[in-house]
Image (cartoon, rainbow, N blue to C red):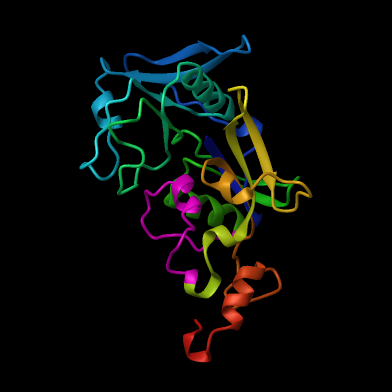
Amino acid sequence: MLLARTATIGHGATTAPGCDRLTKPTMAHPRQLIVNRRGSTVSVIRITKDDERYEALSQGFNQRWTATPDYIAMAASTEDVVAAVGDAVSEGKRISVRSGGHCYENFVSNAEVQVIVDVSGLDQVYRDEGRDAFCLGAGATNWRLYTHLYRPFGVTMPGGSCYSVGAGGHISAGGFGLLSRQFGLTVDYLHAVEVVVVDQDGKAKAVIAERDDKDPPPLAGLVLGAHRWWRRELRGDHPLLDARSPPATQERVAQRRPDQLG
């Protein structure tokens, strides 16, 4: 079982622990203090069936699919995700995860899901100097990513053009957009991910896997559940290729004919 917060791109983006932002609830059934199995309290919003938000949050972008979960857990930090997953696992509930809600299939909203962990509140976009990368929260939308990368840092990434797609699903699926023919996929620039996993003892915990780890967990599998991403080599220039481009992009470009470039 994998959940994640954000990923990092080489010379790219990550989310820092102190950067987690909580959104003040404005309606009934606000953020609840949940005591997890470690005995500490974590602030998580639980949307239950008696909440007027429940119906809307049980659906994604494709309203053909509607779930009837016991509740939707609205997470805004790594600790929230760990608590939400830990509680669901201890209760034997089936989990699905939503970032932007743009999944056209019923992977999130289906008849079997009992808890939807919504990570749209993890929308941080910042530069992690320690990892020399940018950190992106899984809940950050394309619009937020592009504006918060370009305006302060003058860089971008080859993602999609739909502004409201969330980074969690977009990067996990590869991340294809108008710049991909020239610069490759968004996932090509992936440096590290932070995910919430469940160990053999049923304990939820956060794990960070980096591309350069000597003994890493399987990164490809972790990306499918990541809630935080670190990315390097984000594009701030427009030459076709330079030394900072990841190897996967270099190889693809090198194999193209001149009329296929650009």
Residue 77 position by quadrant: top right
The residue lying at 59 percent from left, 52 percent from top is 152
The residue lying at 28 percent from left, 24 percent from top is 54
What is the residue that sits farthest to the left in this orientation? 64
What is the residue that sits farthest to the front in this orientation? 200
Is 24 included in the stretch rendered in magenta? no
State the image coordinates of residue 144 (x, y, percent, origin top left): 46, 48
The residue lying at 75 percent from left, 53 percent from top is 212
Q: Is any part of residue 157 visible from this angle?
A: no
In the rendered structure, the answer to whether residue 161 lies left or right of residue 50 reads: right
Residue 22 vs 9, above or below: the answer is above
Is 167 included in the stretch rendered in magenta? yes
State the image coordinates of residue 75 (x, y, percent, origin top left): 48, 27
State the image coordinates of residue 8 (x, y, percent, origin top left): 62, 49
What is the residue that sits farthest to the right in this orientation? 214
Residue 100 vs 10, above or below: the answer is above
Which residues, given as a range, are shown in magenta? 154-180
Residue 27 position by quadrant: top left
Q: In this orientation, which residue lies closer to the viewer: 2 or 194?
A: 2
Q: In this orientation, which residue lies closer to the viewer: 208 or 130?
A: 208
State the image coordinates of residue 9 (x, y, percent, origin top left): 62, 54
